[in-house]
Amino acid sequence: MAGLGVGLIGTGYMGKCHALAWNAVAPVYGDVERPRLVMLAEATAELAERKAAEFGFETATGAWQELIDNPAVDVVSITTPNRFHAQMAISALKAGKHVWCEKPMATSMEDALAMQAAWRSSGKAAVLGYNYIQNPAVRLIRKLLAAGTLGTVNHVRVEMDEDFMADSEAPFTVRNEGSSGYGALDDFAVHPLSLLRNLFGGVSRVFGDMAKPYPDRPVAGGGRRAVENYDIATALLHLDNGASGFITVNRTAWGRKGRIQLQIFGDRGTVAYDQERLNEVQLFTRDGPAETQGFRTILTAPVHAPYDKFIPAAGHSLGFNELKIIECRELIASIRGEPSNTLDFDDGVAIERCVHAIARSFKEGGWVSAGV
Ligand SMILES: NC(=O)c1ccc[n+]([C@@H]2O[C@H](COP(=O)([O-])OP(=O)(O)OC[C@H]3O[C@@H](n4cnc5c(N)ncnc54)[C@H](O)[C@@H]3O)[C@@H](O)[C@H]2O)c1
């Protein structure tokens, strides 16, 4: 297969991750043609030119539609703020391009469904940026579940905490505006929900709660402005497989930097994982005498594919950017029509349904169906 022609829209935090992934995927894996970095789009032509030179793209534009119209572009990386995802993804799919779109899928259910419809009629690949499912540690957990190591899973818990909004005096930003969505629910909860989807499949019912620890924040230039959405969200869940579940997300959790704590309880054992220690899996099984039972730490190593593609030696650890390189390789598998560990626009819609069901449950005060 000839090297894919890549178009990248956006060059912030995630844009750089995608650029690193497109630059690294061929040398890391050795089984794909080196992608051709065709065009980069940014909000202004000046920024686009500068970033194209830094990231190794051949051409640059300040008008993203020009990138989508470029016949040399086969696949479009969408790393712009959430409100642009739907229009850019739909436009790219209609132009016959594959799409790699950052999370969350969209800012409304209508947009998510329109993206799904555009994808289904396109015949192209569409993958969402749910990078945490790519961790070799998470793949190991999936393998343990499939092997029955934990027995029948009866309860799953995911907590996601960061503290970038923990300071009550941090200035009001666009993230605090109602137009940005529910808050932590759509910004953060999609990550725990992506893990649940990847590991277990569907969620049938939810009971949601949301909280606003700080009612207002200072505005640049003086005064304060009321916070319009919620920094904390929690939901009780029922999974399609019969297990009960619980997720909570908090962007005001002092001291937590990138915690995604996953715990899975079965009738024979427990597995625990935390994104802040992303090369470790904690496993408890009832094997052996009770006196010596306890959690043991499994450190990911070349035996946990695809760690081996990056480093031939154990103990050196992968990081966040490597997860994006793995995601890029899985996207290429999806483009090739090969089996891939990805969440597509059908999965994205299922995750969005859950998010909106949690918000509806919070408003109505009871259990709500999260299915179709
Ligand atoms: N997968 C993850 O773990 C993860 C982590 C952080 C952010 N995200 C998601 O990635 C997306 C981007 O977030 P970010 O943190 O990289 O934001 P960012 O602000 O760092 O970057 C966004 C970029 O998009 C550019 N942009 C804005 N409007 C544009 C337009 N009309 N045309 C072209 N470029 C435009 C901005 O100039 C900026 O460079 C969001 O949807 C966010 O939810 C995902």
Image (cartoon, grey):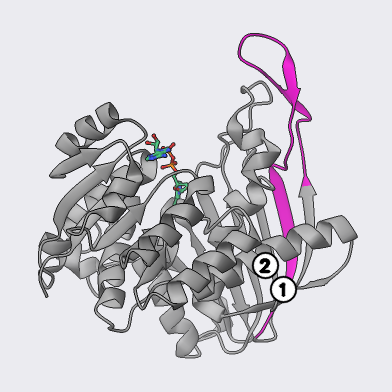
Residue 221 percent location from the top left of the image? 62, 9
Q: Which residue is label 2 attached to? A: 354
| Nearest the eye: 246 or 206 | 206
Q: Is residue 198 above or below residue 44?
A: below
Residue 192 falls left or right of residue 9: right
Image quadrant in which the C terminus is located: bottom right
| Nearest the eye: 315 or 365 | 365
| Label 2 neighbour load within 10 Å: few <14, some 14-19, many 20+ | many
Instruction: Give the amino acid at mark 1.
Output: Ala
Image quadrant in which the N terminus is located: bottom left
**Is label 2's Cβ within 8 Å of ligand 1?**
no
Instruction: Give the amino acid at mark 2.
Output: Cys
Q: Earlier in the sequence, mark 2 or mark 1?
A: 2
Q: Residue at x 26, y 34 (%)?
A: 48
Q: Secondary structure at mark 2?
A: helix
Residue 153 falls left or right of residue 359: left
Tell me where the magenta segment starts and ends, as one range. Answer: 211-240
Quarter residue 26 falls in: bottom left
Residue 311 falls left or right of residue 208: left
Residue 281 percent location from the top left of the image? 43, 67
Q: Which residue is label 1 attached to? A: 370
Q: Is residue 294 visible?
A: no
Q: Can residue 150 be found in the magenta stretch?
A: no
**Is label 1's Cβ within 8 Å of ligand 1?**
no
Which of the numbered marks, if any, corresponds to residue 288?
Answer: none
Quarter residue 98 falls in: bottom left
| Label 1 neighbour load within 10 Å: few <14, some 14-19, many 20+ | many
Q: Residue at x 82, y 62 (%)?
A: 361
| Callout 2–callout 1 Cβ contact below 8 Å | yes
